[in-house]
C-alpha cells in the first residue's frame, strides 16, 4: 500500500533481445502529478511472456520497471535479472543489476520474489544491529573537536545554574 508501478514503464528482454508480453493485466487509471494520466498497478501483477522454444537454460530474462510512492516520491527504473529454467519457469539470477548497470548480490527477499510479483514496498523497519550502529555513530560524533565548545553549555543546562 502506498506504492505503485507504471504499466508503460515495464520492459522485458531475453538474453538482450526485447520481448513483448502476451497481454498486460488490467491496471488502474491515476492522475499522476509528474506524468499526467497514466495506468498503474498498486498490487502485484502476473505478466505472461512468450518464450521461443530456442531459449536455452542459460538464457537470462531482464525485467525493468519504474514506480512511485503515493506521497509523490518517484524512484529510478529498477532492473531485475532471472535465469530461465528448461520448463519455462524463472529463478532469480545470481546477480541483480541496478539501473546504472552495477551488480550486487540478490537479497533473500528478492530470491523469493518472482517476475510475476515484483515487490512494491520497502522492507519494514530496521533491526537492533542498525539501531545500535546509529547510536554508536552518534556517540562518536559527539566526541569530535567541533563539539568541545558545547560542553560548558550542556553542563550548565544539566546543572541548572548559570
Image (tube, helix red, strand yellow):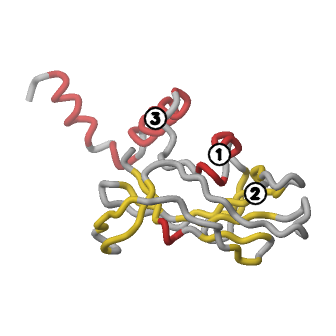
Count of number-bearing discs = 3
* N-term mark: 3 or 2: 2
Residue under circle 3? 125
41 shown above or below 17: above
Q: Are marks 3 and 2 in contact (CB under 8 Å)?
A: no
* N-term mark: 3 or 1: 1
Within 10 Å of disc 2 (Cα), the crowding (few <14, some 14-19, many 20+) is many
Residue 49: name its quadrant. bottom right
Q: Quadrant of the N terminus?
A: top left
Residue 155 spot, x, y in % from top left: 22, 29
The extreme bottom residue here reads 17
Residue 151: name its quadrant. top left
Look at 65% across and 64% down and name the residue there. Answer: 63
- Which is more toward the observer, 49 or 57? 49
- Which is more toward the observer, 75 or 115? 115
Within 10 Å of disc 1 (Cα), the crowding (few <14, some 14-19, many 20+) is few
User: Which of pointers 3 and 2 indicates the residue nearer the eye?
Assistant: 2
- Which is more toward the observer, 127 or 114? 114
Residue 4 spot, x, y in % from top left: 42, 56
Look at 70% across and 73% down and name the residue there. Answer: 19
Residue 23 spot, x, y in % from top left: 59, 66
Look at 79% across and 66% down and name the residue there. Answer: 51
Residue under circle 2? 82
Residue under circle 1? 113
User: Which of pointers 3 and 1 indicates the residue nearer the eye?
Assistant: 1
Q: Which mark is residue 160?
A: none
Residue 112: name its quadrant. top right
Q: Quadrant of the C terminus?
A: top left
Look at 52% across and 34% down and name the residue there. Answer: 130
Side of 125 where 152 appears, left or right: left
Amino acid at each position: 500500500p502506498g506504492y505503485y508501478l507504471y504499466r508503460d514503464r515495464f520492459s522485458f528482454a531475453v538474453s538482450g533481445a526485447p520481448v513483448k508480453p502476451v497481454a498486460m493485466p488490467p491496471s488502474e487509471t491515476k492522475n499522476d502529478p509528474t506524468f499526467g494520466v497514466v495506468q498503474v498497478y498498486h498490487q502485484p501483477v502476473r505478466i505472461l511472456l512468450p518464450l521461443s522454444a530456442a531459449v536455452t537454460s542459460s538464457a537470462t530474462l531482464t525485467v525493468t520497471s519504474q514506480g512511485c510512492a503515493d506521497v509523490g516520491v518517484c524512484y529510478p527504473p529498477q532492473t531485475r535479472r532471472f535465469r530461465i529454467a528448461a520448463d519455462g519457469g524463472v529463478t532469480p539470477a545470481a546477480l541483480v543489476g541496478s539501473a546504472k548497470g552495477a551488480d550486487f548480490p540478490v537479497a533473500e527477499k528478492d530470491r523469493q520474489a518472482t517476475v510475476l510479483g515484483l515487490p512494491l514496498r520497502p522492507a519494514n523497519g530496521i533491526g537492533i544491529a542498525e539501531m545500535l550502529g546509529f547510536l554508536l555513530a552518534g556517540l562518536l560524533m559527539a566526541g569530535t573537536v567541533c563539539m568541545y565548545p558545547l560542553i560548558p553549555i550542556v553542563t550548565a543546562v544539566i546543572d541548572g545554574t548559570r
